[in-house]
Each structure stands twice: as C-alpha cells, then as structure tokens.
C-alpha cells in the first residue's frame, strides 16, 4: 500500500486461529484482512490476529461488519493499520467512514489508550503515524453505488476501493455470473471513473485461481484480495481427495 506503483496482493482471514494468520503471513502476502462481516471472529480474536500479523511485518486490515463507528475505533485501537468498509453506496457513507477513522479536526474518532497507542506511552507517535499510513478502503459492491462513484472517490482520506464481485453481481440480479457482459461492463465503468483519482484499484478474486489473478493484474487492478483461508483450504483438500478416489 505504501508504494503506489506496486501491485499489492493480500487475502482474507475468516478463521480465528492465530496459526492461520501466521501461515498466511509466512506465505508472502502483502496484507491480510480479518473479516468481521462474514465470519464468527470476535473483537478479542481480531486483536490477537492483528498482533500476529503485525509481528510478521505484514499489514493488518480489518473488514468491518458494517460502516460502524464504534467498531472502527475498537479495531483501530487494537492496532489495525487498514480499514475495509463494506457496502459503501453514497458520498455520505464514505464521509461517515472517514470521520470514524480519524481524530479531530479531520474526523470525530474518540481518543483511547490501547494497544495501537502503546497503552498511552505512544499516543503522539501513533497520531503522526496514522495520519500518513492508515489505509481506508471502501467496498464498491452494490449497483446503487455506481452513480455516486465520482463523489465517493473524490473524498480525501479515501485511499482505494475494493470491488466485491458476489455482492455487486447479486445487486444486479445475476449473483456469481462474473462473465455476464453487463457485469463486466459495470466493472470497467468503476475502473474508468476511478482512473481520474489517485486510488488503489482493488478487486476480490474469490477462487484461488492464478489465471484469474493474472487476468486482474492485466486489467489494471493493483490491490488484489486473493481468495480466502477457507476457500484455499477447501480447494486444496478436494484436489487431494479427488486423487485419492482415483486410486480406489
């Protein structure tokens, strides 16, 4: 995320065990996003995962349950270095997210003395670090957002967007049909509008398929969420299982 020219490849964590995070960090991902929207991970587990990711020198993101200021400040106080906000549909949604991430005068986040601030000993350093290094990513995953993209992307402190393909296609009445021309044209429209702004161009490649990953890189995406822990585990297990069945 620090190098605008670099392609940044991360993944999702939906399993709350620290070993999962450590294994994925050691695999070489640039960042990992702890998913609070579609998992049973608690805030306590999230802090433990953030700690592990930090110690592995990988950037810890948290994908929120919703655009909730109370949850944002708690995961930031736990040490999250990036926030991914789901279902951003409007200018007002994006403004709420920015306000929740930043202290006054930029936003309205309240000041706590927790892990991120070294429990009070590092508050000043944290404020300086945060203003330069915190990454705020909005998810564009609903058809209602498309007409509001210029307003959303123009907001200062929005660092990038991440297309959620399943939710976006579902909102268009074609869930999971990523080859549909209307869906593909909508994705192209998002990329075209975003090109006017200095943003990370993100998309989630849900299936662990290296060909799709290369395709998205060629399409100009430079922040790619590559699959997720459970899908990679499932695909690997089923691949072995199918080989085992052939021997019987």
Image: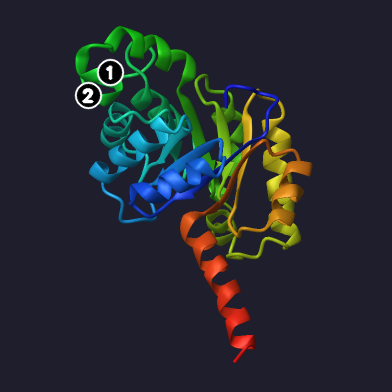
Kindly check if marks 1 and 2 are in contact, taking CB atoms under 8 A apart as contact.
Answer: yes
Q: Residues within 10 Å of mark 2 (few under 14, many from 20)?
A: some
Q: Residue at x 55, y 26 (%)?
A: 159
User: Which residue is more in the foreground, 176 or 242?
Assistant: 242
| Residue 176 point in image, percent of width and height | 60, 64
Residue 53 is labelled as none
**Hey, which residue is sitting farthest right in the picture?**
218
Residue 85 shown left or right of residue 199 in the figure: left
- Residue 44 visible? The answer is yes
Q: Give the vertical position of 204 relative to 92 (above or below).
A: below
* Name of the residue lying farthest toward the bottom: 248
Residue at 26% across, 48% down: 42
Residue 222 occupies quadrant: top right
Crowd band around label 1 with a 10 angstrom C-alpha radius: few (<14), some (14–19), many (20+) = many
Between marks 1 and 2, how big is the CA–CA gap? 5 Å
Is residue 65 or residue 120 the one in the foreground? 120
Residue annotated with mark 2: 114
Q: Dot 1: what SS?
A: helix
Residue found farthest to the front: 247
Q: Quadrant of the N terminus?
A: top right
Pick the quarter of the image with the C terminus.
bottom right
Q: How is the image coloured?
A: rainbow
Q: Residue 139 at x, y = what percent?
A: 52, 42
One can see residue 89 in this view: no
Q: Position of residue 158 (x, y in %)?
A: 52, 26
| Label disc, if present, on residue 117 of the rendered structure | 1
Residue pictured at 58% horizontal, 23% vertical: 154
Q: Is residue 89 left or right of residue 62?
A: right
């Amino acid at each position: 995320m620090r190098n605008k020219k670099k392609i940044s490849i991360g993944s999702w964590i939906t399993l709350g065990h620290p070993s999962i995070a450590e294994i994925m960090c050691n695999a070489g991902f640039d960042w990992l996003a702890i998913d609070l929207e579609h998992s049973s991970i608690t805030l306590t587990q999230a802090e433990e995962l953030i700690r592990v990711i930090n110690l592995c020198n990988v950037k810890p993101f948290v994908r929120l349950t919703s655009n909730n200021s109370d949850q944002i400040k708690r995961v930031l106080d736990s040490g999250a270095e990036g926030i991914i906000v789901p279902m951003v549909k409007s200018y007002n949604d994006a403004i709420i997210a920015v306000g929740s991430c930043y202290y006054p005068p930029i936003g309205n986040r309240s000041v706590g003395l927790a892990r991120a601030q070294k429990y009070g000993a590092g508050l000043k350093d944290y404020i300086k670090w945060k203003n330069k290094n915190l990454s705020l990513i909005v998810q564009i995953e609903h058809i209602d957002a498309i007409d509001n993209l210029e307003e959303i992307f123009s907001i200062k402190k929005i660092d990038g967007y991440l297309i959620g393909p399943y939710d976006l296609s579902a909102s268009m009445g074609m869930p999971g049909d990523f080859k549909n021309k209307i869906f593909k044209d909508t994705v192209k429209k998002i990329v075209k509008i975003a090109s006017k702004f200095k943003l990370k161009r993100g998309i989630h490649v849900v299936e662990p398929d290296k060909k799709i990953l290369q395709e998205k890189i060629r399409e100009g995406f430079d922040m790619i969420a590559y699959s997720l822990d459970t899908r990679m585990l499932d695909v690997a297990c089923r691949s072995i299982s199918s080989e085992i069945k052939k021997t019987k």
